[in-house]
Amino acid sequence: MSANTLADRLEAFNKSDEERHVFINDLIEINTKLENDLRTAKSDHVDQLESRRMWQERAQVSEAILKRTQSKAVSKLIWNAVCG
């Protein structure tokens, strides 16, 4: 094997090694971005769940108040009709 062939093979190996290094760094960068995006999405999901629960609770409280108010109004109307 000639020295020129070995030098060519070494150059090809070094080029391939550099391309592999760039590829791995790109994969790490993409993975880091995806992990950050996932973390943000999870946080947004938790916020939406908490918000939905809060609004559901408010709706239930409002419905209970409305039912009590309606019941009192109906009772008053009946009382006025009977006694009035």
Image (cartoon, rainbow, N blue to C red):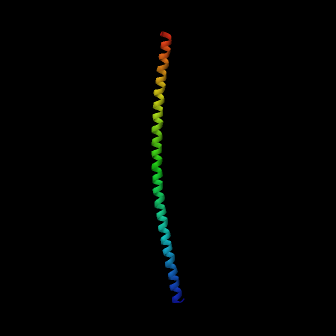
| Most foreground residue, 44 or 2 | 44
User: Residue at the front extreme?
Assistant: 84
Name which residue lies at 49% across and 75% down.
17
Measured as percent of width and height from the top left, residue 26 is found at: 48, 66
**Position above or below: 77 against 40:** above
Measured as percent of width and height from the top left, residue 63 is found at: 48, 29
Measured as percent of width and height from the top left, residue 21 is found at: 48, 71
| Most foreground residue, 80 or 28 | 80
Measured as percent of width and height from the top left, residue 37 is found at: 47, 55
Name which residue lies at 51% across and 89% down.
3
Name which residue lies at 52% across and 84% down.
8
User: Residue at the bottom extreme?
Assistant: 2
Total count of labels: 0
Name which residue lies at 50% across and 77% down.
15
User: Residue at the top extreme?
Assistant: 83
**Position above or below: 66 against 27:** above
The N terminus lies in quadrant: bottom right
**Position above or below: 80 against 48:** above
